[in-house]
Amino acid sequence: PKSTRIVDLLKKRQVTVPPTMAEPASQPSPTKASTPAATQEVLVSSTGHTSGPSSPAYPTSSPPSPAHSTPSKGQTLLAMPCPVEVFSVYIGTLDPLSTLHSPIKTNGSPWCLKMVKANRDHMAASSFVHSALMDAITICLECTSTVIPSVNIPANQLEAVKYYLEQRPYTAAFKTKKALSSKRYRSYYHPDDVDENKRWIVCFVDPADSDVLKDWLSRLSQLIGSGRFQSQRLFIYPFSGVKSVTVTTHDLYRLNDGEYLNDSVIEFYLKYLQERLVATNPELAADVHIFNTFFYPQLVARSNRMGLNLLISLNPYFNMCAFFRIGQILLALVGSLATECYDRVKSWTSKVDIFKKRFIIIPIHDRAHWFLALIVNPGLMVSEAVDGESTPSASSSSPMPPTTADSTQESHEATATPLRRTRSHVQVSSTEVSPSRERIDVNLTNLTGMPTESPSLLPVPDFSVDASIGDSIKRRYEKKLRSELKRHSRSPRKLHNVFNSSGIFILDSLGLHHPMVFRILNSYLRLEAETKQKTVVVPKLQGAYAKVPLQTNHCDCGVFVLEYVETFLREPTFYLEVMMNRLGGRNAWFQASIIRQKRQTIHKTIVDLAKRYQQHQATTADS
Amino acid sequence: MSDSPDQKPAVKPEGSSEHLNIKVVSADSSEVHFKIKRSTPLRKLMETYCDRTGKNMNSVRFLFEGNRVLESHTPKDLDMEDGDTIDVMVEQIGGQ
């Protein structure tokens, strides 16, 4: 219905209107109970020649050469100042040759979309252009390939175009042109117009059929109706409290295939996982602390990023030369810089003691890439100030009272820490299927060097959430893992004990290395320990890169980060062992193919929560 | 972008003890100072800040002690004290 309405509008308003003077018209899509603040204007004009409508904004220098442009019968121009009040959107039959200042060789593709930035807000503008462009290309491609079956654009080319536009908007044109020069569609940023005030995009779709336009318009109106051009608050999560995150339609859009995830989606989903964990497995939930995505940037000095990091990394050497004057000065300098950064996040943990947590999860955003840092057992790094004389392993038990767990494994263990961990894990497993308990047996027998041959050596973990996928993966890798575990249990090299080892793991779906992260997090932990009046007994946690499934495209790293966390929290001990002892390889986690489904799952979660939030609001309003 | 530290635009100064001085620090370390009632929703502060600095509400995040400041929160909700700092961060988008 929406599309027909637009097309009707189009038919009605077959009047020549200069595109720059868009006059208000009726809203094309009063959709979804959303009340757009600004009006969406639809204008249609029909002009004799291609260059006509475009001329006000972009004066045409020469008429299109007939060899290059296909004259179309009635030319339609649709102008839609979008609700963001940032842009005007023109869709029309603009001749590429006349509107572009530099000639590109097209074989006449009059349908195009042009967006003109007409406002000051650069941030909104660029993100708008960016996403509009993505849509435009997708629509172009879909239209071209569905309506005109003769044009087949390989999927990998679409990926290539998207990638270039996404990464290098300013050079995209050339790459794109090159990549698609033989195809019947183009997308183009004009280099002269890529500046703060004028940024526009042209996409050409083959004009073979007017259905293309209809399709185009309906899609566009859907886009507008779906709140793409205007962000609307869906809900806050959790529904009450001060630690909530707002989720908007803009964030929801980020979950579409090919889109990059933003901080809100990441933070929302991590909070969601945490809440779910609190409900299903409170023991584990109490052991986990999740920082938000802004934690790491706050820790990194903005002004003197490189300098600070260098200094922090050299810190140990300063200690050595601290006897000399220069060493003292440098030490003071490092101290002040690191403290300055630390001060920004000092208050973040004022109510929690991260050293009592087993896992600290830190999603990190760095140059358009998401990855995950996981600090394991930070408590082993410190001891309480009161018993500073104790050894690291023994002292680590002091934050937690010695357990009275009645597990039979007690005798195998020398220190109290593993026991505490054991206890917590036993309780963890009680909410799940029993194999988790067997898991512990595996750990402990391995540690004590006793070979285990029992068929239930590796349990099939509880994958109730997406059982089908999880099970199949597990079954596939169970065997491999089991054999590896066996091998290790016989070999003289001992496995790391996941309960009394600590460390920082980086889970990066591109497999990149981030040595700076280790340094910065270690420095953070030291300062945090100081603040919390703990004695640092291990100055530096070991850093390692976990072997995790890798992304195969350019857009999914955010989803991978979320999946790492979800998978890990499902059975932390198991995955810790996988990470620490490098067992099972990348595929021990999950299969990369489930990521696509993951986007839909999160999307659905958000939509469901939005509904529940409305109900929640209604009930709270009543009471 | 305004970064002069001594702007006191936002919410009109009235009484005394009910008012808090709040510092809003952006990613480039520029500061804007606000005076706000304990019971006023922080939406007002956020909107004023965005207006002044020409930012879009949807693309910035306000953080107080590591948590997001929502429009409906009041300084009282968040236990804000005189001289506290709100950090403004830019939306992070990543995928590659």
Image (spheres, coloured by chain):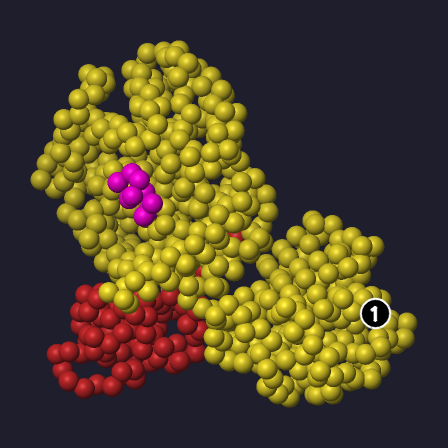
Chain colours: A yellow, B red
| Residue sitting nearer the eye, A607 or A360 | A607
Residue A132 is situated, as x and y percent measured from the top left of the image, at 60, 67
The kind of residue tagged 1 is Gly
| Residue sitting nearer the eye, A117 or A8 | A8
Which residue is disc 1 drawn over? Answer: A108
Q: Magenta: predominant secondary structure element?
A: helix
Is residue A253 rendered magenta in the image?
A: no
- Give the secondary structure at mark 1: loop
Q: Is residue A317 left or right of residue A397?
A: right
For the point 35% across and 23% down, the residue is: A435
Chain to which mark 1 belongs: A
Say if residue A150 shows up in the picture: yes
Residue A26 is situated, as x and y percent measured from the top left of the image, at 59, 82
Q: Which residues are magenta?
A: A274-282
Q: Quadrant of residue A78?
A: bottom right
| Residue sitting nearer the eye, A335 or A282 | A282
| Vertical arrangement, residue A396 with respect to residue A129, above or below | above
